[in-house]
Amino acid sequence: MYPIHLLLALFLIATTSSVKATQIPASTRTEISALFKKLIDSGCQFNRNGHWYSGTEAQSHLTKKLDYLERKSMLKTTEDFIKLAASASSYSRKAYLVKCGSTQAIESKIWLSDQLKILRESK
């Protein structure tokens, strides 16, 4: 007979190893990385909760949201990422905006979706 603490340890190992987050498809990760690169390379600014940030700062913030959603197995497509992580603040629910040069700011959902369409068409 095995001691109870050994059985409990084996049970915990078995249950925690089976509760692993589902990885997002490689093609989705590649598209998200390409969108981050476009945002950074564009020189556009990213508005979150009334403050403007660089593309690099936006990527840093959105990567944290991406990691969270991936741990929760909530992402399968790039569209899921745009909808759940890159469209609005989880805190204030205010839409994120993108502003490129002197053009009018638009919702990040629109900008990212347009960039995704261009990316897919270029393949």
Image: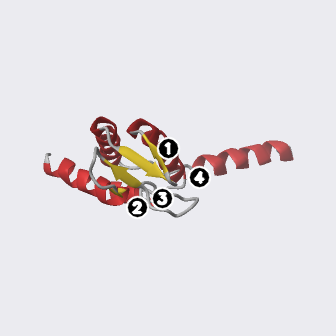
Q: In which quarter of the image is the C terminus?
A: top left
CA–CA distance between discs 2 and 1?
A: 15 Å
Residue 77 falls left or right of residue 64: left
Say if mark 4 contacts mark 1, CB within 8 Å: no
Q: Which of marks 4 and 1 is nearer the N terminus?
A: 4
CA–CA distance between discs 4 and 2?
A: 25 Å
Q: Which residue type does callout 4 highlight?
A: Val
Q: Mark 1 points at which residue?
A: 61
Residue 32 falls left or right of residue 19: left
* Residue 19: assigned label: 4
Q: Which of marks 4 and 2 is nearer the N terminus?
A: 4
Q: Give the crowd class for mark 4: few <14, some 14-19, many >=20 residues within 10 Å.
A: few
Q: Where is residue 115 in the image (x, y as percent from the top left)?
A: 25, 51
Q: Which residue type does callout 3 highlight?
A: Met
Q: Which residue type does callout 1 highlight?
A: His
Q: What element carries label 2?
A: helix
Q: Name the residue under label 2.
A: 83
Q: Identify the residue at image location x=18%, y=51%.
A: 118
CA–CA distance between discs 4 and 1?
A: 26 Å
* Residue toward you, 18 or 38: 38
Q: Is mark 3 on a helix, strand or loop?
A: loop
